[in-house]
Amino acid sequence: MIGFHRPEITRNARSAGKEGRSFSGLTILTKWSVYDQFLRSHQSYTYASCQRRAMLISSIAQLRRSRMKAVQLIGFGGPDMLELAEVPAPEPGPDEVLIRVKTCGVNFAETAMRADRYAITPPVPSIPGSEVAGVVERIGANVAGIAIGQRVAGSAYAAGQLFGGYAELMTCPAAYVTPIPDALTFEEAVALMVQGLTAWHLLDRAPAAGKRVLISAAAGGVGNLLVQLAKRADAALIVAAASTDDKRNFALSIGADVAVDYTASGWSAGVRALTDGQGADIVFESVGGTVVAESLKALAPLGQLVLYGSLNILEFNMGVPELLGLIFQNQSVTGFATVPLMTAASLQRSQAQIFALAAAKELKVTIGGVFPLDQASEAHRALEGRRTHGKLVLVP
């Protein structure tokens, strides 16, 4: 607010000390150097003109607060379709929370949307991203139990809100906002949201206890958590499938028993050799393409192939030979998507459990890359090029 010269309050202001006091809703400047300089240069200001100036400054500050930086999808195609822009900041609805974003997750689904190869076509322009970790900036009128300044995870995707995360601010329905334990960083929290809940519920749908489990993309955001959670669930054998020596070694370091290269020709034979010719009881598959067919060859009689992830949406081929194999070996193929399984209550419960495991150091969280907001296109290139392991995140 603005200090101003009114004889009847100047004495009070001078006696208020350096702490400052409020008179008629206006704060008087009491640091003498600032105060006296202001009075000398504004002797002719009237009370009304000072009020107008205060309102102008307040309006300018509000205008600045109502804008934010965000990454926009400006068209369909490669990573260059992502551009940093200044856009209007969102306003929280009565049942929403406005989050000051500290970290936003980057997912394959967003790369598919950018290329217009996902299950839905995003509007253009739009702001990608649907999972963030940050600090509560504002709350809606109906929101209870969430405090301004609180560290939270906003799982907007679970509420069907697929856009808005690649930004400095994002709104999220309060029912899908979860507190972040102090022991976790914002980056770690984001790595445990889409990927953590996917791994958690995959094992709920296909329990690994006592089973031989094959996990494709085992060094990825979901895969590395699946390896660790399957280990905790007492899987009999965990076979990690990954595309490079570095990724296979990483998977072994976090709990996989053996590893295979899914880019090698006929790699399913290696899985059978590692399982005494039986194959895997459960295959968690997310790579798509030819990896699906090879995964079927690696599947044991009575086995279950679980298909998940946006890459399996892009390309899937199964013919009569594969179908005959399923029938005569009593095998099954299960489709999996996290969001249809989510309610606000189930998300809160499972997210809190995953956060607690990581906070207690019982689950290792791997961040494969941290990119500034203006390098979102580079994050997409890294993800699509499979050059990383763990989770990729953006930081505004």
Image: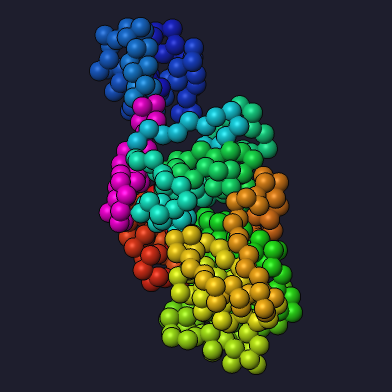
Q: Of 341 and 26, which appears nearest the observer?
A: 341
Q: Is residue 165 left or right of residue 173?
A: left
Q: Position of residue 335 (x, y in %)?
A: 60, 62
**Label tally:** 0
* Rendering quarter of residue 295: bottom right
* Image quarter hosting the N terminus: top left
- In the image, residue 394 lies in the stretch drawn in magenta: no
Q: Is residue 248 left or right of residue 34?
A: right
Residue 203 visible at all = yes
Vertical placement of residue 383 versus 81, above or below: below
Q: Position of residue 181 (x, y in %)?
A: 63, 54
* Rendering quarter of residue 8: top left
Q: Of 112 and 171, which appears nearest the observer?
A: 112
- Residue drawn at (67%, 44%) of the image: 344
Q: Of 258 and 112, which appears nearest the observer?
A: 112
Q: Position of residue 239 (x, y in %)?
A: 59, 82
Residues shaded magenta: 62-86
- Residue drawn at (69%, 63%) of the image: 205
* Rendering quarter of residue 35: top left
- Residue drawn at (30%, 56%) of the image: 78
Q: Position of residue 272 (x, y in %)?
A: 59, 88
Residue 231 visible at all = no
- Residue drawn at (48%, 68%) of the image: 317
